Amino acid sequence: MKNSSKRQKIVILGHTGFLGSCLYENFHEDPRCEVCGFSSADINLSLPKECRKLLNVIDKKSIVIMAATSLIRSKDFTSFRSDLDMLNNTAEIVSLAGIKHLIYISSIAIYGRRSESVIIESSGPNPDDLYSLSKLRGEQIFKRVCFDSGIPLTILRPCTIYGRNDNRSPFFRFLNRVRDGKEIEIYGDGSSKLFWVHKMDLYRIIQSVIAGRKFGDYNIVVEGNGISLLNLVELMFRVCGRETGIKFTPSEKSPNNLRFDTSKFKLYFPEIKLIRLEDGLKEYQNKEV
């Protein structure tokens, strides 16, 4: 293994979360990297005094990956306020430290659920819940602070992240229902679209961002037209080798009708061979997933 002074220092904020743990484990196996991880149990980023502890860890040679969030439920105002405090405090600390590179994990949720135009990275945001608003505020805060401080910034906007150890996404919920011989419940008429990216693909994308010093905004969407919930259920029936039926429940939300232009991603990440959805879903057939 190389001397630690010559390895790239990577600090992952939110390293015990679904994505953060994947990043931490894989970068930890890379001998070229020296990896530190912090969760809310280690440092409460929403408290200024706690957040300042990062100054003992990060410096001008550090790459910081901001994957931390406290906001899960779209109507949770307490978590929303906590998220904003966390974003502001973290921005202040990375500015004081003058870090080498900041990578912020945002979300395509900033675009909302409906658009008449095909979405590109410069499309106007249209947040429609507290989660998407929090992600947009994070982008705005980090863009302002990084510009003023001369810190290179990469914003990644992934769609639904799935893979081993997922216990929240529609993929997990739907396949569990099929595996248990139960109907899959779809809210709405099944036309709403879902977009996906496997967590290992996102890790490889971040590897490429660091190695190639790729800055700016990137939408991380595998298929620009996504997949309808109805087609997703049919795919899951094929993957599981059984059909358990579908139950339709009325929904107050309008269907997601977004479409994405993926040309920027393909231009900047031509080496990334994305995992097919059908192959990724097979992981969920293991009871340990």
Image (tube, grey):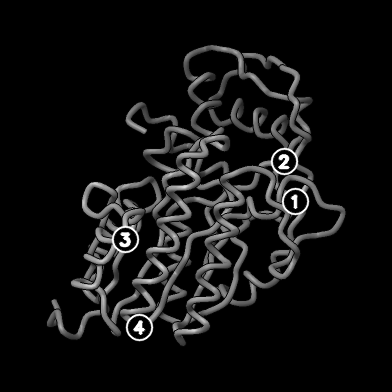
Q: Which residue is mark 2?
A: 193
Q: Amino acid at mark 3?
A: Pro
Kind of residue at disc 1: Asn
Q: CA distance from mark 4 to mark 3?
A: 17 Å
- Indicate the secondary structure of the residue bearing disc 1: loop
Quadrant of the snapshot with the C terminus? top left
Quote the CA–CA distance across marks 2 and 3: 39 Å
Q: Position of residue 33 (x, y in %)?
A: 25, 73
User: Which tag is nearer the camera, tag 3 or tag 1?
Assistant: 3
- Please, which residue is most extreme toward the right here? 116
Residue nearest the viewer, comparing 122 with 182 = 122
Secondary structure under tag 3 reads helix
Q: Compare marks 4 and 2 and give the one earlier in the sequence.
A: 4
Q: Nearer the viewer, mark 1 or mark 4?
A: 4
Q: Residues within 10 Å of mark 2 (few under 14, many from 20)?
A: some
Question: In the rendered image of this protein, does residue 282 appear above or below residue 95?
Answer: above
**Rendered image: mark on residue 98:** 4
Residue drawn 42% across the image and 38% down it: 166
Residue 48's disc number:
3
> In the figure, residue 149 lies in which quadrant?
bottom left
Q: Image point 21% across, 71% down: which residue?
A: 57
Neighbor class of circle 1 (other Cα within 10 Å; few <14, some 14-19, many 20+) is: some
